[in-house]
Amino acid sequence: MKDMLNLVTFNALIDVCGKGGANFKRASIIFDEMLSNGVQPDRITYNSLLAVCSGAGPWETARSLFSEMVYRGIDQDIYTYNALLDAACNGGHIDEAFEIMSEMHYSTIIRGCANAGRLDRALSLFNEMKFAGIKSVL
């Protein structure tokens, strides 16, 4: 049975925790089991966890999961940011939601510049973001 537990299986189990009444505690247990089995999470894992958080988890947990995702070098997508925005708004953290929205635009173009080998432009945009007072949600 243990051999059958893979990334797809764990992701499906975590995703189910967000359906029909979010159960973050159960999703967290499954995530811990996933890690203890040596299965590395991916963007789908984190997006599912963030989606469960947006319905049932505290904002601090969602923010921590997002930071962990970035630390692990896992790219974010529109679903990641939408789930993070939902978690912030549902938790009453409206100011943080606006910061996330501002950062989303910069993050997308900075990543695009980096992928295109335009590191100078990526760094310039990063500095522009900081100068504009847009804080990283990390």
Image (cartoon, rainbow, N blue to C red):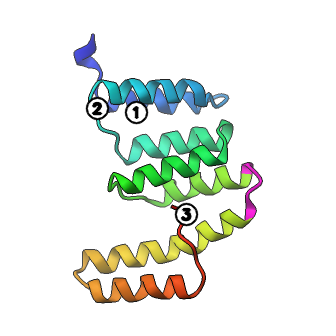
* Quadrant for the N terminus in the image: top left
Mark 2 vs mark 3: give the one in front.
3
> What's the distance in space between the residues labelled 1 and 2, CA to CA?
10 Å
Q: Amino acid at mark 2?
A: Val
What mark, if any, has residue 137 been given in the picture?
A: 3
On whether residue 46 falls in the magenta region, the answer is no
Q: Element type at marker 3? A: loop
**Furthest residue to the right?**
92
Residue named by callout 2:
39
Residue 130, position in %: x, y? Answer: 52, 82
Q: Element type at marker 1? A: helix
**Taking 63 as reference, is 108 left or right?**
left
Q: Residue at x 77, y 53 (%)?
A: 92
Residue named by callout 1:
11
**Taking 4 as reference, is 71 left or right?**
right
Residue 23, position in %: x, y? Answer: 62, 27
